[in-house]
Amino acid sequence: MTGDDTAAEGSAGDVAAPPLARKVDYLFRMVHPHDRCPFSLQEAAARIERLTGEKVSHNTLWKLRTGKHDNPTKRVLEALAAFFGVTPSYFFDDEVSRSIEGQIELLAVLRDTGVRGAHLRSFLQLPPEAQQMVGELIESTARLERRGQTEQRGIRWRLSLL
């Protein structure tokens, strides 16, 4: 791995990847600020150390993400969890993982659609069922918007033929 490697390189997003690698990869792909791409391995390693005091090399992160290493120390998993804002049980408990991933996906939709600050704080105070309903509403609205944009392009194209 070089200093320029991004977090996307060597990801374990496929089904054959070990469970821990899939979870680490998922966090790298999904948890990042709205105005930028996912964290590089080097950037994540530096931020983990600043946040937690735990030194985790970018090479260790790469090995965890790709399934080359699947038995990290408790401290490394706690540091990773703190960096990504999840509970350490995310890595061990499939029910917790599914719940957290549902929340992350919804937050990613909110992040990617421009919802900010007060909206997110209010959203996070809702019970899980209400969060799911809000997420479904947003996804439904986005589908309608995309369909409307496609129809508008079709109309413009047909008008250009006149």
Image: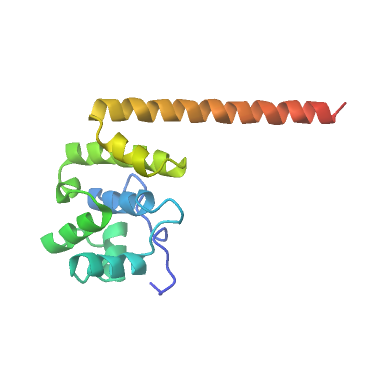
Q: Residue drawn 30% across and 30% down?
A: 131
Question: Relative to residue 109, is residue 138 depicted above or below?
Answer: above
Indicate the colouring scheme. rainbow
53 over 124 or under it: above or below: below
User: How far from the left and from the top, in percent, is residue 153?
Assistant: 70, 31
Q: Position of residue 39 (x, y in %)?
A: 38, 60
Above or below, comparing residue 89 to residue 64 in the picture: above
Horizontal side of residue 153 vs 92, given as left or right: right
Q: Quadrant of residue 59?
A: bottom left
Task: Left or right? Give the position of 159 relative to 40.
Answer: right
Image point (26%, 67%), residue name = 60
Q: How many numbered marks appear?
A: 0
* Image location (x, y in percent) of residue 28: 34, 54
Residue at 54% across, 25% down: 144
Quadrant of the snapshot with the C terminus: top right
Left or right of 69? Residue 146 is right
* Residue at the extreme bottom of the image, as rendered: 3
Q: Residue at x 27, y 37 (%)?
A: 124
